[in-house]
Image: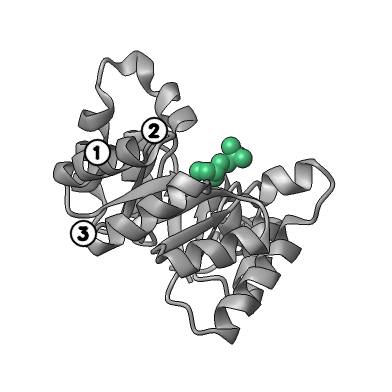
Amino acid sequence: MKFYIDTANVDEIREAAGLGLLDGVTTNPSLMAREAGRGKTFHQILAEICELVDGPISAEAVSMDFGGLMKEGRELVSIHKNIVVKVPITIDGLKAVKALKEEGIRTNVTLVFSPMQALLAAKAGAFLLSPFVGRLDDVSHNGMETVAQIVQIYRNYNFDTQVLVASVRHPIHVLEAATMGADVVTMPFKVISQLVKHPLTDVGIERFLKDWEKVKK
Ligand code: G3P
């Protein structure tokens, strides 16, 4: 399973990349807005991220019409070859996914909340598909059940589109994604840190270090 980090913060990306676990990055307009005070443009931040991680870097297009999505998509990939254009699941979005693919531009279909949206995105030729599990959980709909249905549908028809579990809030989302065979999970830095931790590891280290003091060296 591939690990992406879900942030536009270059310090967090640098630290996560240092762990050697990072396969890519996802950003969105809200994550970009958090970096607005640092004096860098959207394009500068993306270029910096592409230098830090050699893998797919998702950057979101914000146009709502086909022409605007095409223009934005072409501009975004001109920043770096690793950019994947995030496109919301709409009628114009689907048209853009197909047309961008014909130009060799990869897309990440985002704001996906149902298996049928996922089926349409795969048929249009999306490279990545982002179901938002945390936001589904927030409205009392089990987000990971939706992911399981999507994974099953993609397997049934051998779609190439990769399922990228997004809006991840805690390690159980990651565990379930791995169990059901999702291709990618994108996580905030906090969740990556939580995956490392176990209280019994901390207790074990403390006990070993204490006992080591008694050993004749
Ligand atoms: O990048 C998209 C997604 O991961 C957003 O997560 O926490 O805003 O629902 P969240």
Q: Are marks 3 and 2 in contact (CB under 8 Å)?
A: no
Locate residue 140 relative to residue 20 in the image: left or right: right
Mark 3 vs mark 2: which is more N-terminal? 2
Q: In the rendering, at what x and y percent does residue 60 appear?
A: 39, 39
Q: Nearer the viewer, residue 29 or 47?
A: 29
Mark 3 crowd level (few <14, some 14–19, many ≥20, 10 Å Cα): few
Kindly identify which residue carries mark 3: 103
Which image quarter: residue 94? bottom left
Q: Residue at x 40, y 36 (%)?
A: 65
Q: Nearer the viewer, residue 29 or 70?
A: 70
The C terminus - image quarter: bottom left
Find the distance from the CA under tag 2 to the CA under tag 1.
Answer: 9 Å
The quadrant where ligand 1 appears is top right
Q: Are marks 2 and 1 in contact (CB under 8 Å)?
A: yes
Amino acid type of the residue tagged 2 in the rendering: Ser
Kindly identify which residue carries mark 2: 63
Q: Are marks 3 and 1 in contact (CB under 8 Å)?
A: no
SS at mark 3 in the image = loop
Q: Nearer the viewer, residue 101 or 148?
A: 101
Label at residue 183: none
Locate residue 61 relative to residue 157 in the image: left or right: left
SS at mark 2 in the image = loop
Q: Residue at x 68, y 46 (%)?
A: 134
Mark 3 vs mark 1: which is more N-terminal? 1
